[in-house]
Amino acid sequence: MAINSTGLQPSQGAGEENNRVQGAPALDAMQALASTMLRCVECLALYPAIEAGQSAFPMPRYRCDCGGVLDVEILFKHPDAQKRQTQDAFFFDADINALPESGAVWRQLFDERISSPPIWATSTDKHLLDASGVWRYRELVLPVPNHYVISRPEGNTALYPVGMENCGIGRIGHRQIGVYAGLDRFFLKHEGENPTGSFKDRGMTVGVTMANVMGAKAVACASTGNTSASLASYAAQAGMRGIVFLPVGNVAAGKLAQTLAYGATTVQIEGDFDDAMHLVENVCNELGIYLLNSLNPFRIEGQKGIGFEILQQLDWQAPDWLILPAGNLGNTSAIGKAFRQAYQLGLISHIPRIASIQAEGANPFYRSFNGKFTERFLVQAETVATAIKIGNPVSYTRARRVIEESDGIVESVSDTEILAAKAVIDRSGIGCEPASAASLAGARKLVERGIIRHDDRVVGVLTGTLLKDSKTGMPQGGSGSVIKPTIEAVRSVLAQ
Amino acid sequence: MAINSTGLQPSQGAGEENNRVQGAPALDAMQALASTMLRCVECLALYPAIEAGQSAFPMPRYRCDCGGVLDVEILFKHPDAQKRQTQDAFFFDADINALPESGAVWRQLFDERISSPPIWATSTDKHLLDASGVWRYRELVLPVPNHYVISRPEGNTALYPVGMENCGIGRIGHRQIGVYAGLDRFFLKHEGENPTGSFKDRGMTVGVTMANVMGAKAVACASTGNTSASLASYAAQAGMRGIVFLPVGNVAAGKLAQTLAYGATTVQIEGDFDDAMHLVENVCNELGIYLLNSLNPFRIEGQKGIGFEILQQLDWQAPDWLILPAGNLGNTSAIGKAFRQAYQLGLISHIPRIASIQAEGANPFYRSFNGKFTERFLVQAETVATAIKIGNPVSYTRARRVIEESDGIVESVSDTEILAAKAVIDRSGIGCEPASAASLAGARKLVERGIIRHDDRVVGVLTGTLLKDSKTGMPQGGSGSVIKPTIEAVRSVLAQ
């Protein structure tokens, strides 16, 4: 049931109130989110962020009635407005765009927040939010009252200078990454340094916060990897139940170890993946379970924090290129959206070009790009880089807009190229999970092809920590030589 | 060859200059370290931080001639002295102690540094150092010229409020930790959030920096765990070779996976652990390999950063208790030393009491404590908490001083208690490796015994990330129920 931008209509979902949280619905949050909308990326229909269900309990919406994916649209509040406390302080994108001073005001706000000493442990919710690499940018992420926020805090990950020129003294080993890519000024943003070891925490803090606003008792997803680990951790923190729904036969306890440790429940559903998941979508509404599948539009808003934080770490001097691994295309969409909004608000003076790197065996977006996006592909995905092993990316339409708007590019790299790049990142002492290395493999390829110049300022994103996968592409046979305890023997073995 | 505090005598070590780095020795570093000494913790003999070898190349020293462990002593430079640029700006502990205003000056210095926006990626070495949770306190850690420092940066780990009163909204799941401990105001400092996933990075950044000062081409240790992973990562960054020496038959490639990924070499030495390691100590000097075994005194200086950072995150309001896992006793020594120095410098107004928690099967320090330290014990260590599975702790004497000075306590907890505490930390969504959970198990026990009061302000240290050990104490049989895709089936399985 679509609405236009001036009127809201509640959905007809049948809420099972017994399974909802007790007490009044989150009226203050609903009021704060009145200017936040969900736009269908396919038919452009508009929905409110929260729709009232029966008995005024909010009903989550994950798709447009046309079946399309939804994108969050926030009417940004000018930072000065908070000080002035006026009611007419809401601007549309176009209005903010027209304010020449607005970029400086936003930069000042975010720089003040990042300069607060991190004494949040003894301090107020405001300090907690300022210390997060997501909620520091809260006006641009989700304008919800502070007390709903579930945050570790997350983000604040390192931006390693690894180019041939910018690597600096004290990190000459990191410089090998720049040599391998052929780049003078190259940075790696390591999202594996988030609390659960992957970038997923950035989206999850916003997703679980929305679950909190909705009064959900439980949150669920279908994933055996980074998403389920992050969901389980944030759900536990919030005192919600974490549930991982999987089609029968898709559970490998080892891959779920982190998720299970955080106390999440695994439920196997009969049927194939699509059947099971579609039914779960409906079942969840009935049982007060908030779905944090990749469909969930609020997770993308949190992942925008990667983009904002990179810009702030570069002192708001936008790089020429941003390179990242591309599977479900959530990060391409999120970082691209962050850059677009940062440009619209005057935070930066140009939009970086985005290079999305797919694995050769899971490259539907690459195929579409090569055909100038006239066709959408679906492939049987196969790659060692499991975190981007996706045959039918959920965020295809959002990501396509990002590539087109940013004059971006989509590249494809083989598993061999990914593992070679991973070995370079690992041996530099930084390390990453296999999918992350697609960024470096892609950088090297695009420099070789002459698309990225050696003196461009380039940021690559690493999505997960080395510790997430201690097998794929790791050196084998580490038992080493057995030697006698003599100088000669040690010297000889080290000379090998 | 011991010296007194007024004269230095070079050692007679035979340097193999061919294997040292080419070029001049690090004269600027030697000058900067002129006021840094090594004191034997047993016989109190004093040595310079760097001793000249043949041809004026520095020769590392890991032990006193009496065989005792060495402790770093720095003559702190008053922070105002840097601004005044005077030559007479060096004070002894006693002098600084006598300056009433000195605490405020130090606090201001460290608070200014922590408030610098983290734009170190584009910035100078000074910004890099300020962004590290070790080098932010560099005057108190190692007064070496900035350009020798090898830093990721490390530290800046979260201090989670988890007590029954201080856990705050948005983290009611974390509150279960406070309930389990029986503490109202309880914090967990999560050192697993360091770059390689454990607190070892804090000591390693200082150890590898000293290797850099020494002109070493390689660094080595004997460990299959967190130490070797950290060593390998920092060595790689610095462009040094990382070597893990192990007695034959002690290599499990799985445990070394992270280390091998970072490119370190494994060498198996014939003989038992002690024989092999003692010989390696001598061999290393000949080959320009700097030893970063637990003997190395500079690693302890880096680990002091845990203590300084806790105090800063608490806005310099020292807690009543600091609880931590205790194996080799390096952290007990380091954090205790940090608190002692912070108190001497006027940074804090009292020294927190230290509670060192040992595993029942590896509790030589606990036995000594119970006998009022009249006897030193050696045990055959056995515990699931491998990171504290130590039968003969290297830092025994240093740690004894800390317990005595801080009116501290040593407690012992069973593997069952450790795993129960780990399950509580994991299920809260925070997670940790097994040894870390000794902090919570010990807190609970000491509250039950009435030694820690429920309303004391208490900080517990978690030493490693959950991802370091995905087997020990993790939930088994996570495959879960298989159900039909109906609301009734989902509701029924979730009600279990």
Image (cartoon, coloured by chain):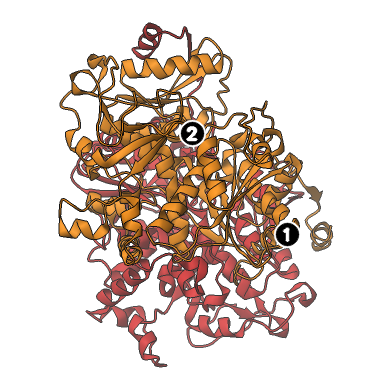
Chain colours: A orange, B red
Residue A461's x, y, as percent? 56, 51
Amino acid at dot 2: Thr
Q: Quadrant of the C terminus of chain B?
A: top left
Q: A422 above or below A44?
A: below
Q: Residue furthest bottom?
A: B87
Earlier in the chain: of badge 1 and badge 2, it is 2
B365 left or right, relative to A99: right
What residue does disc 1 label? A450
Position above or below: A256 against B365: above
Residue, x 28% and y 14% (percent of image)? Answer: A14
Asked if residue A64 is positioned above or below residue A165 in the image, the reply reads: above
Chain for mark 1? A
Residues B33 and B365: in front is: B33
Residue A406 located left or right of residue B261: left
Residue B164 or A456: which is nearer the viewer?
A456
Q: In the image shown, does A148 or A53 lie closer to the viewer?
A: A53
What amino acid is at disc 1? Gly
Q: Is residue A87 left or right of residue B136?
A: left
Chain of the residue where label 2 is placed in the rendered structure: A
**Residue B371 in view in this figure:** no
- To which residue does mark 2 refer? A227
Residue A13: x, y in percent? 30, 17
Q: Evaluate whether residue B397 shows in this view.
A: yes
Q: Callout 2: 10 Å neighbours few (<14), some, many (20+)?
A: many
- Residue A202 lies, with reference to residue B484, above or below; the image says below
Of the pair B319 and A168, the residue shown nearer to us: A168
Q: Quadrant of residue B105?
A: bottom left
Question: How many residues crowd mark 1 within 10 Å: few (<14), some (14–19), many (20+)?
Answer: few
Q: Which mark is residue A395?
A: none
Q: Are marks 1 and 2 in contact (CB under 8 Å)?
A: no
Residue A279's spot in the image, x, y percent? 44, 14
* Secondary structure at numbered mark 1: loop
